[in-house]
């Protein structure tokens, strides 16, 4: 009688553990989709800001800027923004031109969302690998 009760408890526990393993992986995959969706939304918002007269290259007026020393030399040669990332160009852009800080903020949020999605994806892959190995060792489908 005790042996059967113990066997039943272990069978139930195994069922719960397998379910929890599945739920964990599914949660991680859900979080990947959630962060990817947030990143796409931020990217669209940033594109909307760029579409409202906000130049993605930005800072053209800085290409011919005079250094603060006042000796008349141009900063950075021909174009100090050549080869700069969009984020760098936007950070140098004159705030009076429009939505510079909004665009930077949206880019930052999109980058953060991308990193979060990648982190959750790694967790999901690790959970899948670990749980699959345990199931294989135990001979469980």
Image (cartoon, helix red, strand yellow):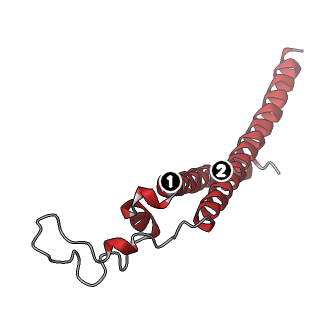
Left or right, 30 with reference to 107:
right
Q: Determine which quarter of the picture holds residue 89.
A: bottom left
Which of the pair 85/137 is nearer the observer? 85
110, above or below 20, in the image: below
Q: Residue furthest bottom?
A: 78
Q: Give the residue at x 73% y 41%.
A: 21
108, above or below 70, in the image: above
Labelled disc at residue 35 = 2
Q: Determine which quarter of the picture holds residue 2.
A: top right
**Residue position marked by numbered label 1 in the rendering:** 108
45, above or below 18, in the image: below
Lower sequence index among marks 2 and 1: 2
Q: Give the residue at x 80% y 48%.
A: 140
Which of the pair 87/68 is nearer the observer? 68
Q: How crowded is mark 2: few (under 14 residues within 10 Å), some or many (20 or more)?
A: many
Q: Give the residue at x 80% y 38%.
A: 19
46, above or below 30, in the image: below
Discs 2, 1 touching: Cβ within 8 Å:
no
So how many labels did they put on this image? Answer: 2
Q: Residues within 10 Å of mark 1 (few under 14, many from 20)?
A: some
Left or right, 71 with reference to 129:
left
Query: Where residue 111 sits in the image (x, y, percent)?
Result: 53, 57
Left or right, 86 with reference to 1:
left
Which of the pair 125/61 is nearer the observer? 61
Q: Which of marks 2 and 1 is in front?
A: 1
Query: Where residue 110 sits in the image (x, y, percent)?
Result: 57, 56
CA distance separating discs 2 and 1: 14 Å
Q: Is mark 2 on a helix, strand or loop?
A: helix
Q: Give the residue at x 90% y 15%.
A: 1
Query: Where residue 121 sits in the image (x, y, percent)?
Result: 63, 54
Labelled disc at residue 75 = none
Q: Is mark 1 on a helix, strand or loop?
A: helix
């Amino acid at each position: 009688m005790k042996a059967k009760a113990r066997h039943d408890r272990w069978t139930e526990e195994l069922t719960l553990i397998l379910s929890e393993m599945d739920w964990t992986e599914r949660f991680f995959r859900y979080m990947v989709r959630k962060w990817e969706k947030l990143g796409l939304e931020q990217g669209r918002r940033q594109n909307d800001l760029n579409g409202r007269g906000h130049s993605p290259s930005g800072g053209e007026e800085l290409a011919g800027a005079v250094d603060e020393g006042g000796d008349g030399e141009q900063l950075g040669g021909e174009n100090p923004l050549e080869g700069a990332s969009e984020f760098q160009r936007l950070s140098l852009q004159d705030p009076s031109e429009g939505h510079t800080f909004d665009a930077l903020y949206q880019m930052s949020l999109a980058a953060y969302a991308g990193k979060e999605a990648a982190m959750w994806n790694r967790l999901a892959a690790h959970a899948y690998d670990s749980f699959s190995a345990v199931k294989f060792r135990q001979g469980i489908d």
